[in-house]
């Protein structure tokens, strides 16, 4: 089960934000399916802490 999102700092109304995607972990789910887990960090320009840290889950089928 995924961890909850963590909002560490408020975001200003006119602040520029950007995100970073951390390295992902691949988990085989089935013969033709894998799950990718990545940590996403959203940062505010000029902020000393991230605005949000979240875990992103994606499933790839073929």
Image (tube, rainbow, N blue to C red):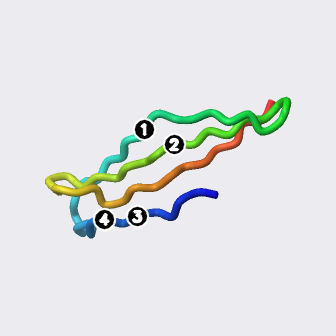
Q: Is residue 28 above or below residue 2?
A: above
Q: x, y percentage for residue 61?
A: 78, 35
Q: Which residue is mark 1?
A: 22
Cβ atoms under marks 2 and 3 closer than 8 Å: no
Horizontal arrangement in the rendering, residue 59 relative to residue 33 (left or right): left
Cβ atoms under marks 1 and 2 closer than 8 Å: yes
| Residue occupying the point 83% across, 36% down | 30
- Between the C-alphas of marks 2 and 3, the distance is 14 Å
Where disc 1 sits, the SS reads loop
Cβ atoms under marks 4 and 1 closer than 8 Å: no
| Mark 4 surroundings within 10 Å by alpha-carbon count, few (fewer than 14), some (14 through 19), many (20 or more) | few
Q: Is residue 57 above or below residue 22?
A: below
Q: Nearer the viewer, residue 36 or 42?
A: 36
Q: Residue furthest right?
A: 31
Q: Which residue is mark 4?
A: 8
Q: Earlier in the sequence, mark 4 or mark 2?
A: 4
| Mark 1 surroundings within 10 Å by alpha-carbon count, few (fewer than 14), some (14 through 19), many (20 or more) | few
Cβ atoms under marks 4 and 3 closer than 8 Å: yes
- Between the C-alphas of marks 1 and 2, the distance is 6 Å
Q: Which residue is mark 2?
A: 38
Q: Which residue is mark 3?
A: 6
- Between the C-alphas of marks 1 and 3, the distance is 16 Å
Where disc 2 sits, the SS reads strand
| Residue occupying the point 17% across, 57% down | 47
């Amino acid at each position: 089960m995924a961890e909850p999102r963590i909002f560490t700092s408020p975001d200003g109304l006119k602040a520029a934000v950007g995100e970073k995607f951390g390295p992902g972990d691949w988990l085989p789910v089935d013969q033709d399916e894998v799950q990718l887990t990545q940590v996403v960090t959203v940062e505010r320009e000029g902020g000393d802490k991230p605005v949000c840290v979240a875990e992103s889950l994606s499933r790839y089928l073929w």
